[in-house]
Amino acid sequence: MKHRSERKNLTYKELRDELFRKARKTVAIGLCTCLQCGICSASCPPGRIAEFRTRQLIRRTSLGLKVDIKNEDLWLCTTCYTCQERCPKKIEIVSMIIALRNIAAEKGNIIPEHRRVCHMFIRYGHAVPLNDENREKRIRLGLVENPPNAQSVEEALNQLQLLVKKIRFDEKVDFKWDQ
């Protein structure tokens, strides 16, 4: 994996091309209709405690300015849809952010926390491991001890891991099969 300082920011053209390719056209078209009213940023929960500004992200993208896909703030969005629900133009903001995250991830820019979740998913077929601690919690909550998921069905886990290898998802998140 490249060191953070070696990763490059995308130019507008690169970003636009990838955004159009990865996101539905309605997302890209919607960006151009943004009024820059700031309701999205004002209603964003992470925006209250960090420098994550949805309005600026939309503006930079629609004006053709560089978007820093290395910035970890891109991963602060909780996908709560508050920004989108309050947007007077009904811009698909969350879809845009997810598309940008996909672009960032393909370029190797993913925060450690998300990388760990990806590793858990690859290894166990689920982001939450089915270990003794979690089994006990499930029993206390009155849930089935072993839910029917890829983690508890070996053949399903094998198929999932085969798919992960086929699409090279393991490489994108630096997963080591031998660890």
Image (tube, grey):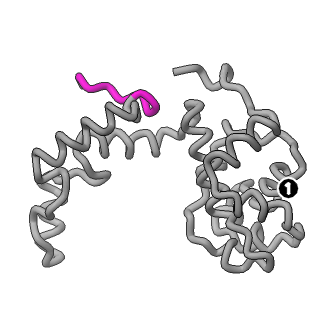
| Range shown magenta | 171-178
Image: 83 above or below 146: below
Residue 112, x across and y down, in percent: 48, 38
Residue 93, x across and y down, in percent: 69, 64
Image: 22 above or below 9: below
Between 80 and 29, the one nearer to me in the picture: 29
The residue that disc 1 covers is: 59
Image: 142 above or below 70: below
Q: Quadrant of residue 7 in the image?
A: top right
Left or right position of 120 against 62 = left
Residue at image position (17%, 40%) is: 158
At label 1, counting other C-alpha atoms closer than 10 Å, the crowd grade (few under 14, some 14-19, many 20 or more) is some
Left or right position of 97 against 51 = left
Q: Quadrant of the C terminus?
A: top left
Left or right position of 163 against 49 = left
Image: 108 above or below 144: above
Between 137 and 19, the one nearer to me in the picture: 19
Q: Quadrant of residue 97 in the image?
A: bottom right
Secondary structure of the residue carrying numbered label 1: helix
Between 50 and 15, the one nearer to me in the picture: 15
Q: Which amino acid lies under the numbered mark 1 shown in the image of this protein?
A: Arg
Q: Main secondary structure of the magenta part?
A: loop
* In magenta segment, residue 12: no
Question: How many badges with numbers are in the image?
Answer: 1
Residue 75, x across and y down, in percent: 59, 50
Residue at image position (79%, 57%) is: 58
Residue at image position (59%, 31%) is: 107
Q: Quadrant of residue 44 in the image?
A: bottom right
Residue 80, x across and y down, in percent: 56, 70
Residue at image position (67%, 19%) is: 6
